[in-house]
Amino acid sequence: MRPTLILLLTLATVAPLRPQVAAPASAPSDRLQWWTEARFGMFIHWGIYTVPAGEWEGREIDGQGEWIMKRGKIPVREYEELAGQFNPVKFDAERWVSIARNAGMKYITITAKHHDGFAMYGSKASPYNIVDATPFHRDPMKELAAACQRNGLKLSFYYSQTQDWHEPDSVGNDWDFPNESAKNSERYYDQKVIPQVRELLSNYGPIGLIWFDTPGNMTVEQSQKLADLVHQLQPLCLVSGRVGHGLGDYDSVGDNQISVGTAKRPWETPVTINDTWGFKKNDQNWKSAQVLIRQLATTSSRGGNYLLNVGPTSEGVIPQESVDRLADVGKWMAANGESIYATSANPFPYQLPWGVITTKPGRLYLHVFQWPRTGLTIYGIHSKVLKASLLANHAALRFSQRESQAGELVSLKLSLPAQAPDPNDSVIALEFAGPAEVDSSLQQQPDGTIALPAYLSQLHKSPGSTAQLDSRGVMERWTKAQDWMEWNFKVNAAGAFDVELITSQQKYGRGWDGGQHVALELGSQKVSGVVADNGKEDNPSNPYWPYVISKMGRMRVDKVGKYSLSLKPEDIPAGGNYGLTLVSVRLAPVK
Ligand code: FHN
């Protein structure tokens, strides 16, 4: 047998390389290019709901601030009076735009009209707007458009096309307008939506995108008409995925969701900095700068855009808690933005145990969240590394690459300082002569763990099965015991493993079924058990959906090599709400 070759490359002497800029294999259309390069935008929810700020008649109304009209079933005539009290005298477009710019954001998407139907710009199509109906009388969108131009950011508009609780012909207001059969959605589209979208695309210069939301019961024709209108008025303006029927230019995943795998289409996730979107005075559940930075890096590592929301007050002020956190994100971006802007997704189809990876031609950026005390080993990089350095200060790192017996580079070992240079996300840049080639097959990681995500399984569906992956990469509606999954993977170090099932709770941990009997088979070994709550695990990229760990038993692997593991439910009790919400199977080495 040929001895394994160890290649030790010392890099301190290698001159810095310029990243090679090559056209990606599938070049984004002209419309998408700026947006996929931007990766990071500011979402702003601002409207007259900021006057009550979550309270109505001395009572806190449950839910998000911008939903107070619906949750409180506030009659249109009473809600309209808020306009007379809305006077955001502290609004300063330049300040808002510089907060976004200094955070490293490249675009702003602001609510031109939310579900309450109130236009936050001067609209001729409806007098129910900020210029005509409030004592403010200014058009903040004009001021923002100018400030964005000055600062090099794109301005985009959120527009609620389906829900409009102010209009008798629209969807959502069943307390003032209970007679559903009297509603004429075409009339609402023709008299309000189409003219207002036209105004937004005609009066504010070049617009980056129109962020339609909650398509609800729109027909294909209605969605198509809106998308066509946008493209006809501004051919370079994007249409969000929530225009409905897959007719947007990109996909918008669920609120506050980050999918676990890479997606087929360009995508964006809207995330709130606290829990509400529109300002709510009692919502103090601010995400830390660390969570925000890691969510941004994680979204980029899966090829998505991160649209982070702030909710300014009725005075026109972005809350200081948001400003502080965005400033911290901005400091990180100033040093590490190269690893976010214009990057592509992690070339490995799976997640790494220590963090996430983004890439550009000739570079891999390792975003290390869990700093390893004894150096970092990565399997599966086949290309020769020319240089490794810390992105923030350019300090070169020593490394070695190991070859397989067949002469293929199979593992990279980096020597690292003992302390994480950045507790939020330390980025290591790896440079290559060309695109980094990696082994995309599933394999045991250097820490001994074998992680088998649902999104990389082969799912064998039985007839009539409704099981599928949701936009987080979690199985939904798996209610038939005849559906089963299998994975092929490589074991690099033999030993005993604890078998754990990771399932996801629903939002805020409110729903989870459990109780399913599941069997896992690996060769002639079989373990089976009940999906039970044996402990929770944080899910930092999706903090609202905690993971549940179920311990299923122990398995042994005596030889390194290729294996296949199957997961077959033996029983899924009827009457559950969610089914088997599988995220992954984990084989954790027994220490
Ligand atoms: O109902 C809205 C909500 O108020 C907020 O605007 C979010 C942002 O993505 N979108 C809707 C729900 O998905």
Image (spheres, rainbow, N blue to C red):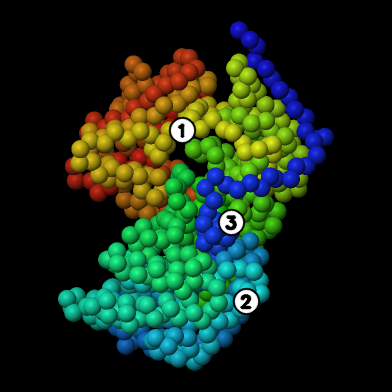
Structural crowding at the residue carrying mark 2, measured as other residues with C-alpha within 10 Å and reported as few (<14), some (14–19) or many (≥20)? many
Q: How many marks?
A: 3
Left or right of 452, for residue 405: right
Q: Position of residue 220 (x, y in %)?
A: 29, 64
**Left or right: 588, with 180 as reference point:** right
Going from the N terminus, do you reach mark 3 or mark 1 first?
3
Q: Within 10 Å of the Cα at label 1, are there few (<14), some (14-19), or many (20+) other Cα atoms? A: many
Identified at 45% across, 57% down, the residue is: 250
Q: Nearer the viewer, residue 199 or 8?
A: 199
In the image, what residue type sits under mark 2? Ala
Callout 3 touching callout 2 (CB < 8 Å): no
Does residue 12 appear left or right of residue 591 in this picture? right
Residue identified by numbered label 1:
451
| Amino acid on which the number 3 mark rests in the picture | Glu
Which numbered dot is residue 37?
Answer: 3
- The residue that label 2 is drawn on is 147
* Residue at (55% x, 63% y) in the render: 41
Q: Quadrant of residue 484?
A: top left
* Label 3 CB-ligand 1 distance < 8 A: no
Q: Are marks 1 and 2 in contact (CB under 8 Å)?
A: no
Marks 1 and 3: in contact by CB < 8 Å?
no
Judge from the rendering whether residue 50 lies leftward or rightward of residue 346; answer left or right: left
